[in-house]
Image (cartoon, helix red, strand yellow):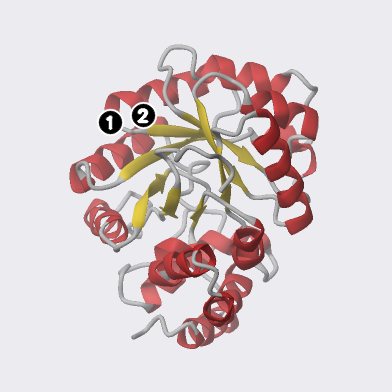
Amino acid sequence: MTSKQQNPFNGIYAATLCPLLEDGRIDEITLARHLEACALVPGMKGLLINGHAGENFMLSRQEKTRVTDIAREVCGTRATIVCGVNAEDSREAQSHVDDAKAAGADAVLVFPPFSWALSQDLRMALTHHEIANSQAQMPMMLYQAGVNAGTMAYPPQVLEQLAQLPNVVGIKEGSWETAAYEAHRLLVRRVAPHVAMMASGDEHLFTCMAVGSDGSMVSLAAIVPELVISLDAAIKRKDLDEARRLNELIYPLAKAIYGTAPGGYANARLKACLKLLGRFPSDAMRPPIGPLPKADIARLERALTQANAYL
């Protein structure tokens, strides 16, 4: 654990998907069923809705609010609802945070705008988060982007300042590199030990959890939730043999989804998994993402079989 006192936001969260109808509208019936099923898995702390896996970059402000409404309706108080916020403009981000609070979210996760992959200075991230949460004053989580995401990934001096902002309760750590994860974990433990460090690189769950984490927010927990929860539990009770066994089931699926080019098709692969498992009637995506090649579908089916996901 990264803090002596238990953070109420610690735990495993399913980063949920947003099912669509063939015409591109949200399939609200399937969405409600999906959110409820994830929330009811024993050991699941809560849901990350409107995250990257939930296509927050493709949904309108009104659609994101509707997703939050549905999550609150079907989950009640049984799950902690964290709402992702992804906006290029800080005032727009503020509106989305306000929407999340009004719709009943318990916390928000503020993502770095995609334009920051080109450049940002040392003050932009602080300004963005301060403005975004200036009115709602909600519990807020940060997103540490992957080491290959350009300048979207916060350098240590920026992460240090962000972790100490008022209302920050956790970090979805998606560096996608265990060395960076460990460095960030040690930094945050030093400057803000109350902030939960969530190991959230789907391909590196085992190693990051072994280093130490306060939970996780991953899309794999929306596909094979029992495996992710069991892996976290095995690490916490120091059962390394069981953790390795679970990782051997999880890792090939993570590679099939995230470790296969092009990386931008990860969400389509996640939806294809849920369709293969009979949980989504359609794996439809909004353009420009099109249908997956048959080879991708076959690879996912093999990985799901290897993970015993059909049982």
Q: Secondary structure at mark 1?
A: loop
Which residue is rendered at x = 46% and y = 58% of the image?
Answer: 285
Q: Is residue 29 above or below residue 93?
A: below
Which residue is rendered at x = 38% and y = 37% of the image?
Answer: 64
Q: Between residues 190 and 230, which one lies in front from this camera angle?
A: 190
**Horizontal arrangement in the rendering, residue 35 relative to residue 6 (left or right):** left
Q: Amino acid at mark 1?
A: Gly
**Horizontal arrangement in the rendering, residue 178 relative to residue 273 (left or right):** right
Q: Between residues 249 and 183, which one lies in front from this camera angle?
A: 183
**Horizontal arrangement in the rendering, residue 267 relative to residue 101 (left or right):** right
Instruction: Using the image, tell me which numbered label, if any, was put on residue 100.
Output: 2
Which residue is rendered at x = 34% and y = 60% of the image?
Answer: 43
Q: Position of residue 308 (x, y in %)?
A: 43, 85
Q: Amino acid at mark 2?
A: Ala
Which residue is rendered at x = 42% and y = 71% of the image?
Answer: 224
Q: Position of residue 128 (x, y in %)?
A: 61, 20
State yes or no: discs 2 and 1 in contact (Cβ < 8 Å): no
Q: Is residue 48 above or below residue 203?
A: above
Q: Is residue 178 above or below residue 80?
A: below
Instruction: Using the image, tell me which numbered label, if any, was put on residue 143.
Output: none
- The residue carrying mark 1 is 104
